[in-house]
Image (cartoon, rainbow, N blue to C red):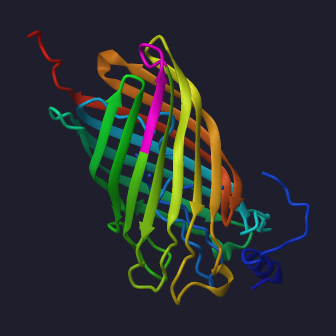
Amino acid sequence: MPRRYLNAIRAMSARRRPAGRPRACALGPTCLAALLILAAPHAQAQDLGHKLLGGIGIDAGVQAEPGFYLSDRIVRYDANRLRDRDGNLVPIRGLKIDVVANAFGASLTLKPKNAPYLSFAFALPLADISVNANDPRIAVDRSGFADIFVQPLKLGWRFPHGDIVTSYAFYAPTGRFEPRGREGVGRGFWSHQFSLGGAVFSGRQRQIRASALLSYDLNLRKRGIDIRRGNTLQVQGGAGVRFARIATIGIAGFALWQVTDDSGADIPPMLRGARDRVYGLGPEIDLLIPALRTRLDLRAEWDFGVRSRPQGRILVAGLTIALWRPAPPGPR
């Protein structure tokens, strides 16, 4: 293996480097296949888990109206930089990462009398992951169905000037996964996700809004290999203003912190103790089409403050259709 490439891989485990670093990292609904950091044929990459940051934005902590919804979300993530555990650039020439994913999902929200809102949801993602560099030995091209996301329970409360939501969800290892191979986009492990969030509003029609959703992912051991992804804490949300009851324009953002180390006998020494971190920010516009019971979301966010992962940009286009809504209560 060329010396320049070995030096680049060793940089991933370096704890201190001289000053003078360039400034310039992010892969579900709240689910989609996560991006891999692919290092070298002889070193397993750090796994970034299931979470696709940026999948939700301004309304992350808003409680949905009762109804049955179908959604489709298309995501494009691209990056040409890799950061080590101190945020320094890893010098991999010609690095180009492209991820295109599509997630189809459905959700049901009910409002029982004298009880909080009850919601249930699932999403099935299809992803294509491409990683290339000047050294052809790290070229990877994978595609297929990723791990399914299931939210068996979400509780919500709505107030005149705010919402509160809390939920439990899990990612099941249904996608193709080969522990030491180069096939499939499945992660090969279960993740349990616990979330708490809310929103605040101003104006008679909730025109001005801000929301956030805090999630904790508890990751279990990978199938067929002794590696366990460290647990992570994430927050997603944003703030915006609604115009003419049909368009919301604002800023969306996210953050992720790995709070426990990766563990297991099969973790390469160079990646031990490396915890990834990333922040993201960018514009969002949401359009409502009341006659079609449809909502369109468009969002772009750029990574910054990155450690132990790629640094790039995510573009999201989402379409949600309300197939059923309960009739409003009639006059007494």
Q: Position of residue 320 (x, y in %)?
A: 35, 33
Which of the 4 image quarters holds residue 269? bottom right
| Outermost left residue | 332
Asked if 169 appears above or below 179 in the picture, the reply is above
Relative placement, left or right, of 134 versus 171 is right
Relative placement, left or right, of 145 versus 279 is left
Which of the 4 image quarters holds residue 157? top left
Is residue 70 magenta-colored?
Answer: no
Is residue 202 magenta-colored?
Answer: yes
Q: Nearer the viewer, residue 209 or 228?
A: 209
Magenta region: 197-207
| Outermost bottom residue | 265
**Residue drawn at x 32%, y 67% as measured from the top left:** 174
**Residue drawn at x 58%, y 27% as measured from the top left:** 250
**Residue drawn at x 56%, y 30% as measured from the top left:** 239
Asked if 265 appears above or below 317 in the picture, the reply is below
Q: Position of residue 79 (x, y in %)?
A: 67, 54
Q: Position of residue 90 (x, y in %)?
A: 77, 68
Q: How many marks on residues?
A: 0
Relative placement, left or right, of 61 versus 278 is left
Q: Quadrant of the N terminus?
A: bottom right
Which of the 4 image quarters holds residue 134? bottom right
Q: Quadrant of the C terminus?
A: top left
Q: Nearer the viewer, residue 312 or 118?
A: 118
Asked if 116 appears above or below 285 in the picture, the reply is below
Relative placement, left or right, of 291 versus 298 is left
**Residue drawn at x 42%, y 29% as measured from the top left:** 162
